[in-house]
Amino acid sequence: MSDYIPSQIEPKWQAKWEADGLYNADIDASKPKHYALTMLPYPSGDLHIGHWYAFTPSDAHARFMRMNGYNVMLPIGFDAFGLPAENAAIKDGIHPMKRTYENIGQMRRQLRSMGAMWDWRREAISSNPEYYKWTQWFFIQLFKHGLAYRKMSPVDFCPHCNTTLAREQVWGDDRHCERCGTPVIKKNLSQWFFKTTAYAEELLNFEGMDWPERIKVLQTNWIGRSEGAEVKFPLADQGSINHAAETQSPDSQSVITVFTTRPDTLWGVTFMVLSPEHPLVDKVTTREQQADVEAYKVQAARQSDIDREAADKEKTGVFTGGYAINPVNDEKTPIWIADYVLMTYGTGAIMAVPAHDQRDFEFARKYGIEVRVVIQPDDTAPLDGATMPASVPASGKMVNSGPLTGTSAAEAFQVAVKFITDKGVGRGSINYKLRDWLISRQRYWGAPIPMIYCEKDGWNPVPDTELPVLLPEDVAWKPTGESPLKLHPTWKQAKCPVCGEPAERETDTMDTFMCSSWYHLRYLSPHYDKAPFDPKQYDYWMPVDTYTGGIEHANMHLIYTRFFHKALRDMGITKGPEPMIQLRNQGMVLGEDNEKMSKSRGNVVAPDELVERYGADAVRAFLMFFARWELGAPWNPSGIDGTVRWLRRVWTLFTDSTQVGSGNCSDDTKKMLRRRVHQMLKRITRDFKQFEFNTIVSGLMELFNEMTRANESGAYGTPEWNEAVDIYLRMLAPVSPHIAEELWEQTGRKYSIHDQPWPTVDEEAAREEEIIIPVQINGKLRDRVVLPADASQEDIKSAALASEIVQKYLEGKPPRKVIVAQMRLVNIVI
RNA sequence: GGGGAAGUGGCGGAAUUGGCAGACGCGCAAGACUUAGGAUUUUGUGCCGCGAGGCGUACGGGUUCAAGUCCCGUCUUCCCCACCA
């Protein structure tokens, strides 16, 4: 017998598996396929314990599927473009490419040390030209199909990173940059967008998707569908009230279009509010108000700074001096601007109904604007706009509302929509919170946007034959607010694909979420050069059967990749409604201090040290054991000792026959051993299917304890013992693959355990012969009775009543009621 | 403000459908083996109580023979989003 020394067995088996191509995933029509995908890491340099927490159970589950007869593909790659590499370049002068590929080398080594069943031949790196060639190609496809467009738009801008951010990338109460934490400001730039909103409705449909309910709810709320109406408010000339003519034929320069979810309250409008960035602000602002409006616009653009210093969240705004005409009653309505109205939601303009909307109410009270009641609740005294202390939500009858007066609140919405439609001043409309996806980044380390601008022919895609548009390596890292590519002396010079005259390349690069929207397709054939993927591989492997990753991607990556798939499907490139059938999310491993792990907090746990000290098998098992996977937990460094002890004991029990008084063993012991083995097999099989990894490991520990007891009763060496070892090692194999392989060999079994089928439950062996029925009196446990497993409910009842303890409690009187709950429990009411 | 998740021993966590609360592990205590123990091993370990027994799943109610689990209300923590019209 030898000691269990992980550092000796783990590299040995990793090398052998690699040499044998044990985990190579190739098309095999004779087997059902299983595409297991884990969100690919960003090559930050060092593998984090969080990576292991994500990867290890995903690997174990993939291994479980493999043992269940599936042809499993588990690929790995790197989401290699991104800002950190560029920031490091600005800071340290190290080229992002050099840094990124060095980091990938380091992380590859770390990843290999965990013994996962990745097929490294399928590795894909998004910053490789052979990869981003196709990212660019997809951009062009989206452009050609009308899903990519350019617009000037107020965007969030990070003054530190000198780059725009998607709305989804702005974090926190202080609206700071996701990457660097700097509060963002707004800036107007002309940029590329994808029309994600074109798929908003379809993205709300999760039919046939085995995704956590939580994620579906998060995405549904993020997409944020709401039904309402668009209503046109023509501008009023200064000092003029009657604009009936304009109401009939408004043009976009003289009309404010609002989106409202409450068209029924149109008669209660007493003011309007534009977003400070709204294009009509300058037009409606009077000379007298100009200074105030300009000052407010500046303040709104720096909203984050102000928010930070503001003690309360009181609404602020400024009157523009301008008026619009309420089209339902031709009333002159003052136009304000306020930063609580967002240019990026709805139309960037609202009608305000202070009597029935709390935000509008607070604003009106603060600035002394009229509050006009148009809904009178059935059960209160008549409301008075001048004195009411708060807005009143709708329920009751319309009052003071022209032709709608008297309509019940329930019908008012439909009646109002019909009224404005008939009058030609608006229409019913559906609005989404979801915005189109801002793709442009004024950065170097990303895939160049493959577009060329010509004075004569406008924007045109780079011809497919000239892809990829390579990133130049000789650039300067000046954070000037411009893309480094723009400052390159020659790179941007191009020929117009239409007329051949000198033209200019797009110098922005793409959001890296673009790269990660289709990496699951590149894994299919990472070196294929005729298309983004080999159709033969696609037809066999897609869709992804199991996708694992963090919940933090619910509203970004997981929406983008669904959008991407659907857009490509409509172009005939992909097939089926969704890219990923089953999704499972893991929680987060926090630091010991219960805070998110980060270098700045100094609470990062380095997996390399753990592997060195305890071995990958123990670290893997512990990561599965120490928390419920989908919840995560703070790192608990002492708990790992228990896992190490367990593996060491398994090693000793399975390899050391000297400690055993083998030979004599009762039939009862053997029977009991088989029963426990098959019961546990049943439990662990169920837990694997349900991604409940912590109980898989605790189950293995429990069964080990049973086996230890059986060993003490002399079970070693019996056929039942050998079966137990056989099944035990197979169940251990997905969790701790190295020690399982080693013990498999040492117990004289044939390489490789990872080619073995998952064991089958022997239901007969698992069946209990006796059942122990708890007996409660008035709901309190008082006794237990033991009966044969095939006892009837009547048998259970009489056995319970016969119990001495029960008799004592009954004091000779009959029980009031006896409940026999299936074969589970008896409750006697006295 | 909106949405989501959660609250069980000293700690991480178990508990199939409403049916024995605390599996498994850590830690701790006592013993064994040791020159030694941050090794190994045995036993014990929810709380109160000498005991019979009582009390216990954030808090307060409710439904039920029976509630960690279901219902109503409250509090706390974490996450996501946010003047969303």
Image (cartoon, coloured by chain):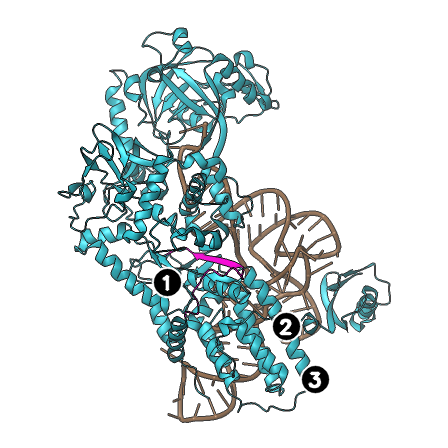
Badge 3 sits on which subunit? A
> Can residue A210 be found in the magenta stretch?
no
Q: Which residue is mark 2?
A: A678
Q: Which residue is mark 3?
A: A667
Look at label 3 and name its amino acid: Asp
Say which of A65 and A464 sits in front.
A464
Cβ–Cβ under 8 Å for marks 3 and 1: no
Secondary structure at numbered mark 1: helix
Say which of A173 and A699 sits in front.
A699
Q: Residue at x 86, y 63 (%)?
A: A814
Residues indicated by labels 3 and 1 sit on the same polypeptide chain: yes
Q: Is residue A302 visible?
A: no
Chain B: give its colour.
brown
Indicate the position of residue A681 as horizontal and vertical percent values: 60, 70
Q: Which residue is mark 1?
A: A121
Chain letter, colour cyan in render: A
Look at label 1 and name its amino acid: Arg
* Magenta segment boundaries in residue numbering: A21-40
